[in-house]
Amino acid sequence: MARGEGKRVCNIVFYGLPPLEVLLYASINNCSKRSRLPYMVRVKVYYSPGCPACRRFFLYAIDTDNLFVEAYPVEDPKIAARVEELVGKVVTPVAELENGAVIRGCPPSYEEFIERLKAAYEGRPAKGIVRLPGGRRVEESKRESGLEELLLALLRKRLEVKGD
């Protein structure tokens, strides 16, 4: 991955086009931080400019102190090949921490985003983490896919409705 001239937006360096929403948010927010990680975390994020989860990842990153992000677009064939190597297919966003941990996707809440980053940095399995430091793959069952949680919530809701 050649590191040409990147465009810096707060704590993110884009090696492709930054999504417009990210530029607007950084401008309005003035790069102020919502919370601070207890340690410096450096991450490479593989993204697609039109991906909603990617944009959310970048907005959360802007809100986080002690997080430095390099963003690479999957439209580049070399970047797409790297993503496929990491997670088995080209999907976005994929975050590769400098310790070797890999996170797939971006959670809907900022709090879960922070917890996922901490777990990946510390080497703990958590939802969305597909690889831990040292290249250890996380089994699907330990990733807490979220589908089971959703199905259980729907089932509970249905039982509550029938019980009334």
Image (tube, rainbow, N blue to C red):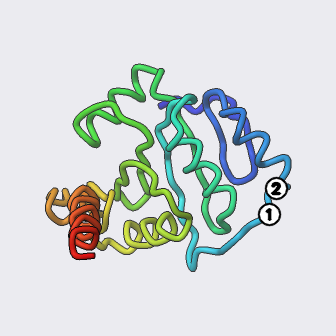
Q: Looking at the picture, how far across and down is residue 5, in whole percent? A: 69, 30
Q: Nearer the viewer, residue 66 or 134?
A: 66
Q: Amino acid at mark 2?
A: Asn
Q: Looking at the image, is 19 positioned above or below residue 65?
A: above
Residue for badge 2: 29
Q: Looking at the image, is 4 positioned above or below residue 70?
A: above
Labelled disc at residue 75 = none
Q: Looking at the picture, how far across and down is residue 162, in whole percent? A: 22, 69
Q: Residue at x 59, y 51 (%)?
A: 69
Labelled disc at residue 32 = 1
Q: Residue at x 71, y 38 (%)?
A: 21
Look at the numbered disc 1 and give the secondary structure of its residue. Answer: loop
Q: Are marks 2 and 1 in contact (CB under 8 Å)?
A: yes
Q: Residue at x 28, y 42 (%)?
A: 86
- Label 2 crowding class (10 Å Cα cut-off): few <14, some 14-19, many 20+? some
Q: Looking at the picture, how far across and down is residue 19, in whole percent? A: 66, 33
Q: Looking at the image, is 51 positioned above or below residue 77?
A: below
Q: Looking at the image, is 139 positioned above or below residue 38?
A: above
Residue 42 in sight in this render = yes
Q: Looking at the picture, how far across and down is residue 65, in whole percent? A: 67, 68
Look at the numbered disc 2 and give the secondary structure of its residue. Answer: helix
